[in-house]
């Protein structure tokens, strides 16, 4: 088996080299906007947020039970206290707690100033207004102290974090109503090719439906991105160049699929050289070798291959890290770990390969992976049925049953 890399006149960039080139070229955006907290999910925090209050702001009970002062406890002996009121969540008991007294209290309710302990309701016996405590009653338990979670003035969330639903909850718990975030990235994408037919139209002989734009729309679905679908552009050099230039003027990133290879109708690289600059074209990745990266004015350009699996692989492995960097998000890597291959895998040395696999885990926690099926870059069905990438390095010349391989889950659920 011969890899196409062996036919190249000079060595192709490795995936790592391509990512390094992109990292050196991409300058994060600096523009910011202020959003209401409910609209900030998925946006990159531009200014760190500091706690305007203590969380919790008051001492409160960690459970339903009875609040008492440990001074009234008889060490190692049963004791009885008088019930004088109730502290509800949102409706505290405000009277002074005298010696020999206790209050009924519910989770989250304010603990009276004189009390320093709470006992679970299941551990006491109640007789009218008398509460009988067992001999093993513990003191100084089940109270959440002021500022136990966050202290007034401390950093709640540091920029440039990409805000999660939990982050929004933390900010809301401190009363933060709005945040300053990086503005959305403006991204446009389109497909090229005379063979492409939009959905909803009859399919003529020699034509195929355009799946790439549907996938790109889903893969680029992110609150931090404003995404525009520019449709299908035919294999017309002047029309493509005009479309590139027009889109570059009001977008941060332009992504095309198709036309980046070496066929007579593949114009992307040539057009990019005419109206912008090419940083690199073609990398040692499979699928996805004919990938172009450059700029048109201030707009970054990614010319992806036309085969649909190659589009997904290059978008996730090459373009997505660049978009995160451009958006100002902190550097992150996708989760990878070793699994035992239960099938033999074919591969020729020369390119880092991203094969589709089906990941499983046995009762002991060990991971196993099997081939997801046919690995052609045009075969989406096997990718739909798979749950991970099997990442095979450039030098790998195949995998035997029982070999350990690196896997990268499509999601954290398998």
Image (spheres, grey):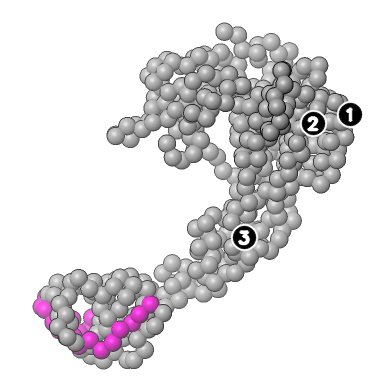
Residue 161's image quarter? bottom right
Residue ID for mark 2: 233
Q: Residues within 10 Å of mark 2 (few under 14, many from 20)?
A: some
Q: Residues within 10 Å of mark 1 (few under 14, many from 20)?
A: few
227 to the left or right of 59: right
From which residue to which does the magenta span run?
69-89
Give how far apart the Cα atoms at labels 3 and 2 are.
Answer: 34 Å
Q: Residues within 10 Å of mark 3 (few under 14, many from 20)?
A: few
Residue ID for mark 3: 39
Say if residue 151 shows up in the picture.
yes
Is disc 3 placed on a helix, strand or loop? helix
Q: Residue at point 14% right, 72% down?
A: 136
47 to the left or right of 337: right
Give how far apart the Cα atoms at labels 1 and 3 are.
Answer: 41 Å
Residue ID for mark 1: 238
Is disc 1 placed on a helix, strand or loop? helix
179 to the left or right of 63: right
């Amino acid at each position: 088996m011969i890899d196409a890399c062996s036919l190249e006149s000079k060595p192709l960039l490795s995936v790592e080299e391509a990512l390094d080139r992109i990292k050196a070229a991409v300058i994060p955006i600096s523009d910011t906007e202020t959003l209401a907290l409910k609209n900030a999910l998925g946006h990159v925090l531009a200014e760190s947020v500091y706690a305007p209050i203590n969380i919790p702001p008051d001492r409160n009970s960690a459970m339903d039970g009875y609040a008492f002062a440990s001074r009234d406890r008889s060490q190692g002996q049963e004791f009885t206290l008088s019930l004088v009121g109730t502290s509800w969540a949102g409706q505290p008991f405000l009277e002074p707690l005298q010696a020999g007294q206790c209050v009924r209290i519910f989770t989250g309710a304010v603990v009276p100033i004189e009390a320093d302990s709470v006992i679970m309701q299941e551990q006491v016996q109640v007789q009218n207004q008398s509460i009988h405590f067992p001999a093993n009653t513990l003191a100084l338990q089940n109270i959440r102290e002021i500022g136990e979670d966050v202290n007034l003035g401390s950093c709640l969330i540091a920029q440039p974090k990409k805000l999660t639903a939990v982050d929004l909850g933390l900010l809301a718990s401190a009363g933060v109503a709005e945040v300053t975030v990086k503005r959305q990235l403006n991204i446009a994408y389109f497909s090229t090719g005379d063979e492409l037919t939009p959905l909803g139209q009859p399919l003529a002989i020699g034509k195929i439906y355009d799946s790439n734009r549907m996938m790109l729309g889903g893969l680029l679905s992110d609150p931090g991105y404003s995404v525009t679908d520019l449709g299908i552009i035919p294999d017309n050099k002047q029309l493509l160049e005009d479309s590139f230039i027009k889109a570059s003027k009001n977008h941060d990133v332009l992504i095309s699929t198709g036309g980046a290879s070496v066929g007579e109708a593949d114009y992307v690289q040539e057009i990019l050289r005419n109206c912008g600059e090419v940083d690199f074209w073609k990398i040692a990745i499979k699928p996805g070798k004919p990938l172009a990266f450059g700029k048109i004015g201030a707009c970054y350009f990614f010319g992806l291959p036309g085969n649909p699996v190659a589009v997904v692989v290059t978008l996730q492995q090459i373009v997505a890290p660049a978009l995160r960097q451009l958006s100002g998000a902190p550097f992150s890597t996708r989760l990878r770990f070793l699994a035992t291959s239960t099938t033999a895998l074919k591969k020729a040395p020369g390119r880092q390969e991203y094969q589709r696999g089906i990941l499983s885990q046995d009762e002991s926690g060990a991971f196993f992976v099997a081939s997801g099926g046919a690995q052609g870059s045009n075969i989406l069905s096997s990718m739909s049925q798979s749950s991970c990438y099997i990442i095979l390095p450039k030098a790998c010349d195949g995998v035997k049953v029982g070999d350990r391989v690196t896997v990268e889950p499509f999601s954290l659920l398998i």
